[in-house]
Image: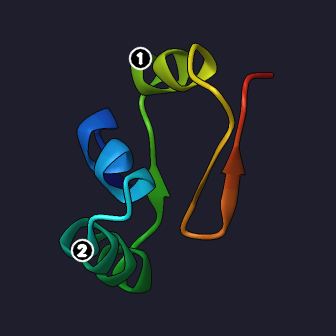
Amino acid sequence: MIVVDTDILIDVARENSNAITCLQQIEQQSSIVISSVTQMVLRCTPPVTICGYQLKAG
């Protein structure tokens, strides 16, 4: 299990190819999770799709 920080998710949302590749490689090797703090930050932002997952407030 790998905890992914908000900064990485923001870079992926901005279509940073290095961040996308890194996240995809991690996903192939382990489960990806986010902290409760990251979850709250994402709830305060507009909906965004990251690696095929729709992240939105809720």
Residue lying furthest front in this view? 14
Above or below: residue 33 compared with residue 18: above
Residue 1 lies left or right of residue 57; in this view the side is left
Q: Residues within 10 Å of mark 2 (few under 14, many from 20)?
A: few
Nearest the eye: 2 or 5: 5
Which one is closest to the eye, mark 1 or mark 2?
2
Residue 5 lies left or right of residue 55; in this view the side is left
Q: Is residue 1 visible?
A: no
Q: Amino acid at mark 2?
A: Cys
For the residues labelled 1 and 2, the Cα–Cα distance comes to: 21 Å
Residue lying furthest right in this view? 58
Q: Quadrant of residue 50?
A: bottom right
Q: Amino acid at mark 1?
A: Val
Q: Residue at x 80, y 22 (%)?
A: 58
Residue 56 lies left or right of residue 18; in this view the side is right
Q: Which mark is residue 37?
A: 1
Query: Percent x, y for residue 9?
Result: 38, 47
Q: Which residue is mark 2?
A: 22
Query: Percent x, y for residue 52?
Result: 65, 69
Q: Residue at x 58, y 13 (%)?
A: 44
Give the colour scheme shown. rainbow
Q: Residue at x 57, y 22 (%)?
A: 45
Q: Residue at x 41, y 17 (%)?
A: 37
- Could you say whether the residue bearing mark 1 is in a helix, strand or loop? helix
Dot 1 or dot 2, earlier in sequence = 2
Picture quarter with the N terminus = bottom left
- Could you say whether the residue bearing mark 2 is in a helix, strand or loop? helix
